[in-house]
Image (spheres, rainbow, N blue to C red):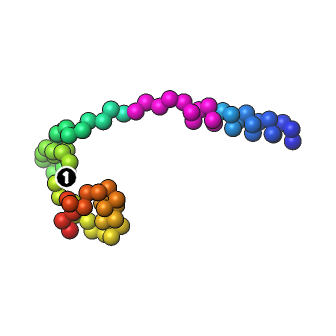
């Protein structure tokens, strides 16, 4: 019983030390226009502009609620 308590305590200390470590933050590129080339099932390739959307179409109420939570309701068109 004493041995199990010691192992649990050591495991808890280990989790605390691992969880408190420094994490790398990914570099965020804002307002960048990135293009991605996509090849569809027929073999045709086309470019997709990865700029932020100008219009958003919501098909379910839950998605509409998420759009309002993100304060992007001015882009909502349907």
Q: Does the magenta stretch include residue 20?
A: yes
Residue furthest to the right in view is 1
| Image: magenta residue range | 15-25
Residue 67 shown left or right of residue 35 in the figure: right
Residue at image point 70% right, 36% down: 11
Q: Is residue 74 magenta?
A: no
* Image-quadrant location for residue 71: bottom left
Residue denoted by label 1: 53
* Image coords of residue 77 (percent x, y): 18, 65
* Image coords of residue 78 (percent x, y): 20, 68
Q: In this view, does 68 lie above or below 39?
A: below
* Image-quadrant location for residue 29: top left
Residue at image point 63% right, 35% down: 16
Is any part of residue 63 visible from this angle?
Answer: no
* Image coords of residue 22 (percent x, y): 50, 29
How many residues crowd mark 1 within 10 Å: few (<14), some (14–19), many (20+)? few
| Nearer-the-camera pick, 39 or 3 | 3
Residue 71 shown left or right of residue 41 in the figure: right
Secondary structure beneath label 1: loop
Residue at image point 43% right, 30% down: 24
| Nearer-the-camera pick, 54 or 2 | 54
């Amino acid at each position: 019983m004493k041995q199990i308590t010691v192992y649990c305590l050591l495991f808890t200390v280990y989790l605390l030390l691992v969880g408190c470590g420094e994490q790398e933050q990914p570099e965020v590129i804002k307002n960048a226009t990135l293009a991605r080339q996509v090849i569809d099932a027929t073999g045709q390739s086309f470019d997709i502009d990865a700029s932020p959307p100008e219009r958003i179409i919501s098909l379910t109420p839950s998605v509409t609620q998420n759009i309002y939570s993100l304060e992007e309701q001015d882009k909502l068109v349907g």
